[in-house]
Image: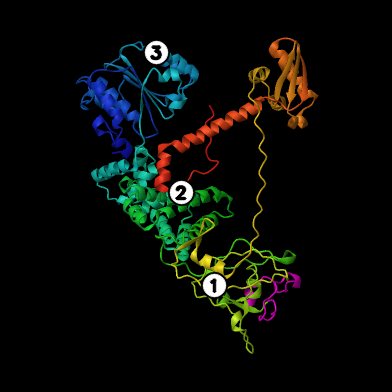
Amino acid sequence: MSYQVLARKWRPRSFREMIGQTHVLKALINALDSQRLHHAYLFTGTRGVGKTTIARIIAKCLNCETGIGSTPCGQCSVCREIDEGRFVDLIEVDAASRTKVEDTRELLDNVQYAPTRGRFKVYLIDEVHMLSSHSFNALLKTLEEPPPHVKFLLATTDPQKLPVTILSRCLQFALKSMPPERVVEHLTHVLGAEGIPFEADALWLLGRAADGSMRDAMSLTDQAIAFGEGRVLAADVRAMLGTLDHGQVYGVLHALLEGDARAMLEAVRQLAEQGPDWSGVLAEMLNVLHRVAIAQALPEAVDNGNGDRERVLALAQALPAEDVQFYYQMGLIGRRDLPLAPDPRGGFEMVLLRMLAFRPADAGGAPDRPLKDLGVCTATADSSSASVADGQTVAPVASGAALGESLAMSPPSAVTASPEPMPSQALPALPAGVPDLPWDEPMQVAGTPVSESAAMLVGGIDAAPAPREAETAPESAVLERQSPSVREVAALPVGDRSPERPSALVVAEEPPLADDDYYEVDGDEVDVEAYAYLEAFPVEVPAPSKPEPELQAEPAAPATGLAAEWLKLFQQLGLAGMTANIAANCTLARVEGSHWLLHLDPAQAALFNGTQQRRLNEALNQYHGRTLKLDIELRKPEQETPAQAAARQRAERQRQAEASIQADPLIRQMIQQFAAVIRDGTIEPLNT
């Protein structure tokens, strides 16, 4: 006995055996039971979702010997012949092989004849979008008004290629793709009935590989049975499909979560043994991160389409939400740039290392396990460098306790920008009692030894020398501060260091305040330790010069008489470019017969020439239909010009918009309850 493939053996023979497509079946069943039958049906959808199967079931429902209904008996000769594909009144046409208009005409020549055995002659045209435009035109009239004994069933995977005249003559039903859950459910039933052992993970692999097609899923299952010698195992299916082990993606994500670069690169090495498509691997990671983000927002919305719902939920609990969004965005950018990498694997590794390097280090949900030391100094530094005399630039100063720790463990030369001494005229005058030291002599600032070159970065600050083997500095020259270390010390500008005004050192007592207290200095909140630092090391900053008030131009008088007429005429001339700009800054001063005189603002004199005057004169002549003589005089207009009128209207709309925002009850409530502030320059009126 010949073997029959699963896709044909398990093809549904009635509506109740159909998998999915409930929205289509409900309409067809109600129409058949109520005898409300249309003469043309169009079924659309991707391959293997049941278009031809539904059409054959409809043919059985129409011609079953027990009567027209939604439940054919399946036992009569008509039902058996349709199932076996030999019913004479079911004409199946492959439009892909019969595209010519002659084939369509030959088909339609037999439409007028009555059916041989059944009640209806059913024409099933598969892949109907392959017909030529002449074939569609030949089919139109018959499709619109066929004989009462004829039914047309059309099927296509590309309905966009069908003429609208065909679509308007059919009842259209769009069949949906099969979700992996539905495919796995059906495969479980089929393999159980066939007595074939299987693994659930293998069915999920087949369900995803089918890509929405139940026929593809059945064909892949046949292949998996043959590959696995009568069994459907996950390892065999994965090897057969050449797909990636989904668990390895989670291995990469868990290594990324733990911050373990060694484990992450080991997971990449294991992936490389399978020779995967690295862009596809990155796409799988993005898919998992997307589902993790859904699990964090709405856990019950996570589907089990990949059979890993529990893993996704566990990862959603362990990974901070902001990290998920960050990794997803970085993965998208990395996938876009992956073709530019010299080696695909190297590009994939760089994406992972970039995720690892830029992950939020101080996030509350970040892993506690620190990364292994790579030998790179972790002291934070100011991004701006301080400039010194003669155009020399020194390295930025590390801030806070990191400065003290790094400098205490490093030789003075490690923090000195240049071994060469600075010119004498650029050095500040030292106070009495402080010996003159070489440029690289170690100093002490706030109890921390630093080189003089680093100490000089703080403008106007004098530092005491650190004790040497046979020499100690005076006690008055050593700074000892009892407060905590300053959180961030910025490089201050070098102040005035003339000999007449030597820099002085003032040590002030610090008030015992908490670390999170703030002072208010000139209306701004300043951290306590930064304020104490500024008091201990005062820097004179010259007072900013007050800008001179801008001269406000006096508003022009409202346009009346000829000036008002010019405002209206300007809108109707249809000018553009430089000519429109000249006309907008003019006003009509005098009209004597055909002689017109315009006053042009002298501020526009640089843009005015004879060409602009000629064009404006031609526009006036065309508008009035007669020849005018136009003179333009450079003189300050006494009344509003079109440009001034437009500016006044814009200012008025702006004022009204700002007043409307200020009076809005919701905005006033936000200002009162949340101390909201309306930013200047952010309100714009609508263009009406």
Please state which of the two labelled residues, at mark 3 or mark 2, is closer to the viewer: 2
In the rendered view, tell whether residue 298 sits above or below residue 161: below
**Residue 283 got which mark?**
2
Q: Helix, strand, or loop for circle 3?
A: helix
**Residue 508 got which mark?**
1
Query: Percent x, y for residue 518?
Result: 47, 62
Q: Nearer the viewer, residue 361 or 218?
A: 361
| Quarter of the image with the N terminus in it | top left
Q: Residue furthest bottom?
A: 470
In the rendered view, tell whether residue 349 sits above or below residue 129: below
At 46% from the left and 15% from the top, the residue drawn is 137
Q: Is residue 63 left or right of residue 285?
A: left
What secondary structure is the magenta-colored segment mainly?
A: loop
Q: CA distance from mark 2 to mark 1?
A: 60 Å
Query: Percent x, y for residue 458?
Result: 62, 68
Lower sequence index among marks 3 and 1: 3
Dot 2 alpha-carbon crowd within 10 angstroms: few under 14, some 14 to 19, many 20 or more: some
Q: CA distance from mark 3 to mark 2?
A: 49 Å
**Residue 491 got which mark?**
none
Looking at numbered disc 2 in the image, what kind of residue is underneath it? Answer: Ala
Lower sequence index among marks 2 and 1: 2
Dot 3 alpha-carbon crowd within 10 angstroms: few under 14, some 14 to 19, many 20 or more: some
The image quarter in which residue 125 lies = top left
Looking at numbered disc 1 in the image, what kind of residue is underneath it? Answer: Ala
Q: Helix, strand, or loop for circle 1?
A: loop
Q: How is the image coloured?
A: rainbow
> Mark 2 and 1 residues: CB-CB less than 8 Å, in contact?
no
